[in-house]
Amino acid sequence: MKKMNSKEFLKALEVLTKEKGIKEDTIYEAMELALASAYRKHTGSLTNVKVNINKDTGDIKLYSYMTVVDEVENPEVELSLEEASKLVPGIKVGETIDTEVDMKSFGRVAAATAKQVIVQKVREAERNSIMEEYGNKVDEMVLGTVTREDKGNNHIDLGRTQGVLPKKAIIPGEEIKMGSTIKVYITKVDSNSKGLLILLSRTHHNFIKRLFELEIPEINEGIVLVYGVAREAGKRSKIAVYSEDPKVDAIGACIGEKGSRIANILKELGNEKIDIVEYSKDPAKFIENALKPAKNVRVFITDDKNKDAIVIVDDDNLALAIGKKGLNINLANKLTKYNIDIKTYEQAKEEGINILEG
């Protein structure tokens, strides 16, 4: 077998660690396991083998070893204390006798086997490295380049790997162009026998939150806080913001001078509308804010434990409070986490709800 070139090995190792982001120890471990596996396959025995790689020179030495025992049960891997003492005086039960293996005895097949296992281990290590990197980015927004489309699902180049933007995770009505750079939200990172799967979304409600963090410095700096987001992708979103500093106008900070900040967010979302509402610790006030653009609403918390509320509106604001196909009330329910029942004054009187008379 052609002698292993230590310099070439070290150079390859340097490339793997720098370009692939794989730790040196992982490569050495893979190399040692590969050589041990190749040796057993080449010799057709179950001999115990250990490998020593000099990390400074790249020189590789392989040893077969036998464990010293009182009574031999497996002569391929065990040696009696009596026989071992002849070779190494004073040796004890449980210790091993190592014999260096002539690397030339491997042959080309064994070397090829070792290479194959090494490549496999390197791939596994690279996949684990990517899994760890992107696993830490779940619930984050990243930039990616659209590379191809397959049955409505778009494949996005994220740098070290590809992610999948499913058809259902694309904002309704938007056009994803090949080669374009887009913002995507990572919802899931999973690894299985088929490889690594990174699921992306542009319809997730937290995609809105991440856009606000990107465009609004006060949110990114923690001056303005986001309580929550309710979203019907492609139609409308509601985001509740507030500040613990009474001098800060949370809504104004999100809108920006002449609407410049919110304009950048709306541009990203196409035709989707956004209502920025002020969060309040007072649930009645919060519900009132969440139902905007409806005005002149009266809110009564009927069961705080079960999160039930009745809202009374005049006839002029009923349609606005409910919204087209119930969109406004549904988003308000999600945002406030209350079950909101909207009634007109006339309906309240007919149902004899006395609390609404006051």
Image (spheres, grey):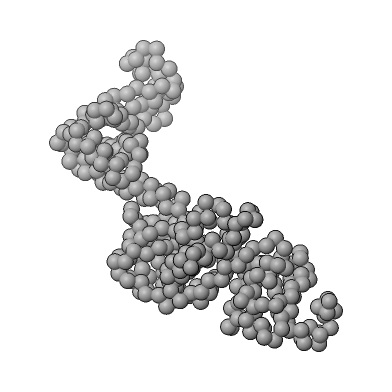
Q: How many labels does the image show?
A: 0
Residue closer to the observer: 228 or 279? 279
Q: Where is residue 49 in the image (x, y as percent from the top left)?
A: 32, 32
Side of 299 where 105 appears, left or right? left
Q: Which residue lies furthest to the top in this view?
A: 89
Q: In this view, does 341 lie above or below 137?
A: below
Residue closer to the observer: 127 or 215? 215
Residue 117 in view (yes/no) = no
Side of 103 where 83 appears, left or right? right
Q: Residue at x 42, y 78 (%)?
A: 173
**Could you say which quadrant of the image residue 41 lies in?**
top left
Q: Is residue 70 above or below residue 267?
A: above
Q: Where is residue 203 in the image (x, y as percent from the top left)?
A: 48, 69
Q: Is residue 303 above or below residue 224?
A: below
Q: Position of residue 9 (x, y in %)?
A: 22, 36
Q: Is residue 56 above or below residue 248?
A: above
Residue closer to the observer: 101 or 72? 101
Q: Residue at x 56, y 63 (%)?
A: 252
Quadrant of the drawing holding the N terminus: top left
